[in-house]
Amino acid sequence: MTMKRRKFLAGTAGLAATGLAAGPFAVGRAIAQGAGMSFTPEEGASLRLLRWVPFVPGEEEAWNANTQAFTEATGVQVQIDQESWEDVRPKAAVAANVGSGPDMVMSWFDDPFQYPDKLVDVTDLATGLGEANGGWYEGLEGYAKQDDTFIAVPLCAIGNAICYRDSHMKAAGFDTFPEDTDGFLELCKAMQSNGTPAGFPHGKAVGDGNNYAHWLLWSHGGMTVDENGEVAIDSPETRAAIEYAKALYATFIPGTESWLDINNNRAFLAGQISLTANGVSLYYAAANDPAMSEIAEDIRTVNLPIGPVGESVELHQTSTLSIFDHCQYPEAAKAYIEFMYQPDRMNAWIEGASAYCCQPLKAFADNPVWTSNPVHEAYANASASLRPNGYAGPLGPASAGVMADYVLVDMFAEAVTGQRSTDDAIANAARRIGRYYR
Amino acid sequence: MARPGLIARFVGSRNGLGFLFMLPAAVFLLCFLTYPLGLGVWLGFTDTTIGRPGIFIGLENYIWLSDDPVFWLSVFNTLLYTTVASVLKFVLGLWLALILNERLPMKNLFRAIILLPWVVPTVLSALAFWWIYDSQFSIISWVLMKWGWIDAPINFLGDPGMARASVIAANVWRGIPFVAISLLAGLQTIPQSLNEAAALDGATSWQRFRRITLPLLTPIIAVVMTFSVLFTFTDFQLIYVLTRGGPVNATHLMATLSFQRAIPGGQLGEGAAIAVAMIPFLLAAILFSFFGLQRRKWQQGGGD
């Protein structure tokens, strides 16, 4: 009963999202699109997609509406299974290994590189989509391409950006947000002495902790391994990053070394901190709560400052779509993905995701979602500033393992809390990285 | 008369029938206990990752772990956590049991209340503790600040020492009911007449406790504490909810480290090796309680 109602709602949302004039012609257009597409589903095909649980209802509605339109256009049923985002990795790995289960997976980070030979080569599909839509963003492409072969199709970057209280920044004597790391440190110092400190997690926060640690390292030019996968963490750049982290940590609210993913949101929304980095969810938590309208109106977002490396580099969170080679209907799966990436479909989805998901293809950068609310703007750059995990080495189980084992998070936390000296923290990280890349 | 068939003879014989009755239990043990344990031990000798079957690499995982400060930190944490929490649970649990064994008004109500921490699902009580220990919103910090005892919130889970104490306190809170109620059951099996006789002979209450109650309670204590130690040693949920092993691995237990390396980290072989490394400690705890605490002589009040 609830399922049916949900499907109906999703369907209507999709119609609304398809555009102004499209309303009654939506189905007809979908079929017309189908005719122009390069992949034809096999006779009697059906598909199963394993995806992460959506963060926002709008995103789920748009995705399901697009899927519904695909089914109407092609007759291919698509069953969508949702898993909480932490469980997608093991589930997909098992499916790849066992050779059964879902046909496609919407997975995180370097997951496709854990079982590249169990995936359908989608170079034709991804190249076609890239050429038609202004090209893939480089960082996202890195998560999908092994050598010259696409083993996945980049889907989105889940953006991370600094969220701060405008009035508190101004009270600290800054009219505009500093763009470089030195100015940022000054701002944090000033905010701390004003009693409105910043806070970034040094605890085992899967998303926020890793985002912060990678930004610290990369913005100073550090890297975990070089292009050949040789450990390269022990460098003057890493030392500079750690010294910078120590100086920044001194300005934080106490207790950040125990923070998990949710703590910075809580502290920010309670007015305990006035600056942190987070996904757009932080803003929406305030905006959707009438009691917090004061905070919501005061929130501004901005990209993390640029360090000595001279460009904006961040980890963010990435998702890709891949097809398992045990899929009986690979053409149908490719057709499905192609359909979902048609401009009006993709744009409807990005819009539905209300700035959570940043476009994988440059042609979608002018999606109205980024200008609909000034808070969204910083998240529009996620795909451009994104750098693949394990930079500058190859992606694979090693890069995934280093992140999952919190090697960088631990390195910075050890040093800023004084538990180890900078050199010892680096040496320990080097050992652990070496182990994964052996 | 025809000889009965082979099956009939087998079922008819004493040993054959016994074997048949044992079969379900044996199959269950083999499939659900021996096989997973054996597989775990085997995985510890391979470099299996999630998504790729491994090859045999001998002791490489253990050699790496022997040189891994994070692993040794987790061993230290686990031993500290188990020892301190178990001793506290034992002392406080025994104390509670003795109080509850006295004639109290509304005794049954108190006994029911004591059980509450044990009844609440661990994850829920862990989440409650997570809030109690929050670095910004801790109720404890808040109250102390209202009273003017402290100026800034206590950094419960951020400072390594505090974090260890905090997770141990949460574990003790949760584990006391099991110890207290089990020991209470044990106390009630001690014949009242022994105590009365001793009292008539002029024994003080401390002497009665030391010479009668404690020796007669040791078999129960041995069993209860074995279980308590095993539960504590393998604790996972509390740590995972409260700290995920932080700050900087100060509260990582072997169980949580094993999970972190094996499932999110994908290094199944290494995770299995960490889990296997727990076995000797667990065996030692079991052997100690069975051969140490269950010695007849000691139970009968003799010296060592």
Image (cartoon, coloured by chain):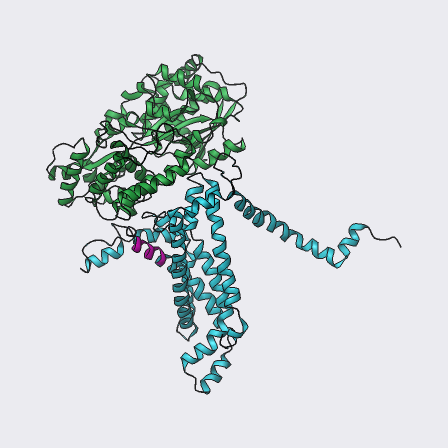
Residue A370 visible, this angle: yes
| Residue A292 vertical position relative to residue B79 in the rendered view, above or below | above
Work out which quarter of the rendered image holds the C terminus of chain A and state it.
top left
Image-quadrant location for residue A315: top left
Residue A205 visible, this angle: no
Residue B11 percent across, percent down from the top left: 75, 54
Instruction: Report the predominant secondary structure element of the magenta stretch.
Output: helix
In the displayed structure, does residue A55 sit left or right of residue A73?
Answer: left
Residue B151 belongs to the span the image colors magenta: no
Chain shown cyan: that is B
Residue A85 percent across, percent down from the top left: 40, 36
Image-quadrant location for residue B229: bottom left
The magenta span reads B155-168
At horizontal 44% and vertical 77% (from top left) the residue drawn is B210
At horizontal 19% and vertical 60% (from top left) the residue drawn is B149
Q: Determine the residue located farthest toward the right in the rendered image.
A: B1
Residue B182 percent across, percent down from the top left: 47, 66
| Residue B292 vertical position relative to residue A184 in the rendered view, above or below | below
Give the drawing colour for chain A: green
In the displayed structure, does residue A61 sit left or right of residue A175?
Answer: right
Q: Determine the residue located farthest toward the bottom in the rendered image.
A: B201
